[in-house]
Amino acid sequence: MIAPTPSLRDLTAASFRIGCLGFGGPAGQIALMHRIFVDEKKWIDEDEYLHALNYCMLLPGPEAQQLATYAGWRLHGVRGGVIAGALFVLPGALIVFGLTWLYATLGTTPIVAALFYGIKAAVIGFILEALWKVGKRALKTVGDVALALLAFLGLFLFALPFPLVIAAAAAIGLARSFSAAPVAGEATRAAAPKTGKAFATALGWAAVWFAPVIAAFAVLGPDHVLTRVGVLFSKLAVVTFGGAYTVLAYLQQQAVQAEGWLTAPQMIDGLGLAETTPGPLVLVNQFVGFLAGWGADGGGLVLAIAAAAMASWCTFAPSFVWIFAGAPFSESMRRSRFATGILAAITAAVFGIIAKIAVVFGLAVLLPADGFDPFAALIAAGAAIALIRFKANIVLVVIACALAGLLRLALPGAA
């Protein structure tokens, strides 16, 4: 039985609670929202929730934040969507900002470096767990395995642009769907939403999204770090299907290799921070933006804050475009075998993308300049086993790995 529509105050309180308790990445956050919105509050029924989740899985960007926005929109229109989507991000963003500031100022001290040594190794375990989960869901046929392999080779061996890999996977999925059986209920069409209204909504929210980027371009010029941060993360918002780990593939290409804003080990540090805090895993984008501003010519704390805010805005603001303009069309998309086929192909490619991330980050952590690091390998293996085999709490795993990093500092001969 569905409860009456909550007041805006009740929705705000529930959304803030989700934002503060949303540990464990998208899977944990989706489960938490289900527990609160469906099981506990009974504001949304099971079918509506799964309907919204299916739609959000088709979108680029952080699907858990989009699901929170969708739920808020479903309950209280645009106001509810803005409140639920913003509060899903804000608590974690504030915590990540504080930790990033400490990292930028204290990251070279031996104790902090030792803690992050353990967290870096733990991140390898997180990525292996992601490979395990995605593989079980995505690699159902020989064609799926081939897609995953092609995505890996394209990124790792040939350094193909990330958007090209995603576009190719989507095209293959679309081609395969022509011969697929119709999805149940595909012939049934709900009343078509008004295209003109959806276009106007998309245009309005896109203007809100791009306003800071355009302002930075006009005032500071195209080569300023703040403009480049806005452009890069706006691109990521459009092309990153498949969750946070796929963001890292493109982000590593652009922020580390092309822009030089940070190093691969620093990227792993940022992912470790995002793993240990509530909110979306793609808050690592905020970490990258902060370091880009911190290390730029004439940079420092003020520019770092501005770049971190720009990165977060361009990561999460697009979700309001996709939800407010596209949610009225979500039912027909959910019943389309073409949309289903595209999503299945992209999901298979995501396995290859995450595998590429595992190799790149694994080499950075396990094979530093002075040779293979068996202690880091041991921490990474322990984290992977704890997460995959024993379903251990992710925060406890990170704490244990950080303490293992401190233990290494105490060993004879440790740097």
Image (cartoon, rainbow, N blue to C red):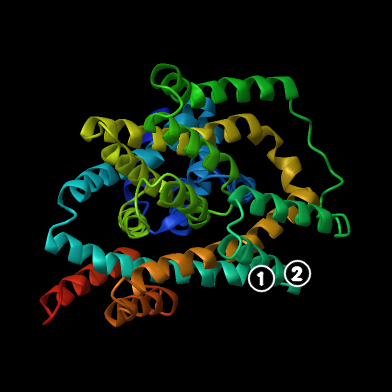
In the rendered structure, the answer to whether residue 98 lies left or right of residue 42 reads left
SS at circle 1: loop
Identify whether 239 is placed above or below 378: above
Q: Please report the residue visible at 13 percent of the width from the left and 63 percent of the height from the top.
A: 111
Identify whether 383 is placed above or below 323: below
Label count reads 2
In the rendered structure, the answer to whether residue 109 lies left or right of residue 393 reads left
In the rendered structure, the answer to whether residue 377 lies left or right of residue 241 reads left
Mark nearest the camera among 2 and 1 is 2
Residue indicated by mark 2: 143
Q: Position of residue 196 (x, y in %)?
A: 73, 20
On the question of residue 14 being in view, the answer is: no
SS at circle 2: helix
Q: Quadrant of residue 415?
A: bottom left
In the rendered structure, the answer to whether residue 113 lies left or right of residue 376 reads left
Which disc, if any, is residue 358? Answer: none
Q: Position of residue 251 (x, y in %)?
A: 47, 49
Q: Please report the residue visible at 26 percent of the width from the left and 71 percent of the height from the top.
A: 401
Q: Please report the residue visible at 70 percent of the width from the left and 56 percent of the height from the top.
A: 169
Q: Amino acid at mark 1?
A: Leu
Residue indicated by mark 1: 139
- In the image shown, does 237 or 251 lie closer to the viewer? 251
On the question of residue 246 being in view, the answer is: yes
Q: Amino acid at mark 2?
A: Gly
Identify whether 380 is placed above or below 205: below
Q: Position of residue 93 (x, y in %)?
A: 32, 42
Mark pair 2, 1: CA separation:
8 Å
Dot 2: within a 10 Å radius of its alpha carbon, few (fewer than 14), some, or many (20 or more) residues? few
Identify whether 366 is placed above or below 194: below
Q: Position of residue 212 (x, y in %)?
A: 43, 23
